[in-house]
Image: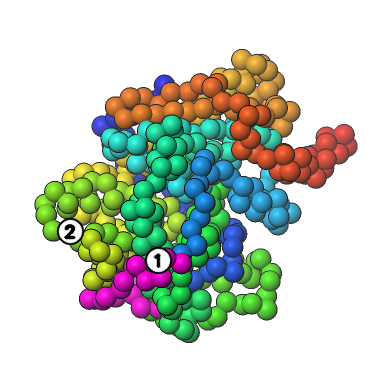
Amino acid sequence: MLHVDARDYCKPFPNFGKPKIIGYIGIENLKYACQIAGKRVNFDLNLHLDRVKRKPPDLDVKLTELLKFLIEHESRLKFPLENQLAAAKYFCYRGLLTCVACTPYENREPWKIVAILYKGNIYLCARDTEEKRKQKLNMSEKDKQFTSWGYKFEQYMLSDRPDIEPNPNLPVDETEEFSLVFTTHLNNHKIVYGAEMDGIRCDKSPVPPFPNAERNPDKIIEYLSSNEFIELKTNRHIEFSRQEINFKRFKTKKWWCQSFLVGIDTLLCGYRNDDGIVEELKVYDVRDIAKMSEKYWKPNVCFNFLDAFLTFVKRSLAKKIKHKFGQKGLDKLQEVPLTCLLFEWAPHSSVRVSDNYCHEDDPILLEWFVQNFGKSKALQLKFKEKC
């Protein structure tokens, strides 16, 4: 078990490397934010709501897009084949890291995470709890409306090119996504993660157009890395002290984690009324978000717990591998077959680990990935060993 008590994780902030962009997903959906300022506005988030193209219910989102990225860019990334758990890379999405990091201060939402060890890497994937699954299947029209309001706000703020204004007079396609793939380290843990991004800010200095003629990944990554991204959020107007407490206790924690994990310094929030009209824009420095909420949560506690969880995952996998394959398995991870563990947590309890997950019944690493990823490098490794 891994104990979850904020008081146990109050040591100084752990060593966290600056997130580095190593790739992208859905580059055709890259957006730009031209006007970033606190001001009064009148954005109707219900505009063309009747013609919105919504995503299908995301029941147990898997790692599919990230796996596609890893296959397509394997020769460029040249990740080494690791045989020791200490050197294993974690692959996941930012949302999972945010969820885990916020756990010491969470008192409402339980979670389930599957860890899969395969060919020396660890893949982390969130699975829906039964309660969460029911919520998704039974979303009310009001819940769907709230979700669509967030997408519509982005349409008011973002454009397709840095030299044109946003055009909200179109129905929103909520299936359009643009993500970056980052790599970083948290103490001794190496992490590769995908994160959906809102847009590049263009208000500080001129941003050149996207280099369409250059489909060279390295050139595109250079372009993306040289620009600054911004995070967009919506929130109901804060009118009462209870609303302000809830805002600082719950929302700011996730906003900060999401932004910090991808190196975003600026967040813009559109404050709306109950009818879906955004009436005020407010710009936040991400560092100030943490400062103004320090009474309710602390960044060092969040990331110390995230570090402890990743250590717990490796320790749990090591125990299972040693039990099944002996010390030889721990020394040669490339020869260990796909190994899974399920980690579960509920408020006011510890993180528990079990074998209650069958990858064959609910595959996260899809067959085309298992059959292809790392095979060319594995052959090279065998050749070197023979020589």
Question: Residue 374: in sight, yes or no?
Answer: no
Q: How far, Cα to Cα, is label 1 from label 2?
A: 25 Å
Q: Secondary structure at mark 1?
A: helix
Quarter of the image that includes the N terminus: top left
User: Residue at the spot x=82%, y=43% of the render?
Assistant: 380
* Image-quadrant location for residue 221: bottom right
Q: Amino acid at mark 2?
A: Ile
Neighbour tally class for label 1: few under 14, some 14-19, many 20 plus, Cα within 10 Å:
some
Tell me residue 356's x, y (percent).
54, 22
| Kind of residue indicated by mark 1 | Leu
Q: Are marks 1 and 2 in contact (CB under 8 Å)?
A: no
Q: Is residue 39 magenta?
A: yes
Q: Which residue is mark 2?
A: 238
In the picture of the structure, the residue carrying the numbered disc 1 is 49
Pinpoint residue 133: horizontal percent, then vertical percent: 45, 37
Q: Closest to the observer: 142 or 337?
A: 142
Image position, residue 368 (x, y; %): 73, 43
Query: Does residue 233 show up?
Result: yes
Residue 95 located left or right of residue 281: right
Residue 212 location, quadrant = bottom right
In the image, the segment drawn in magenta is 34-51
The mark tally for this picture is 2
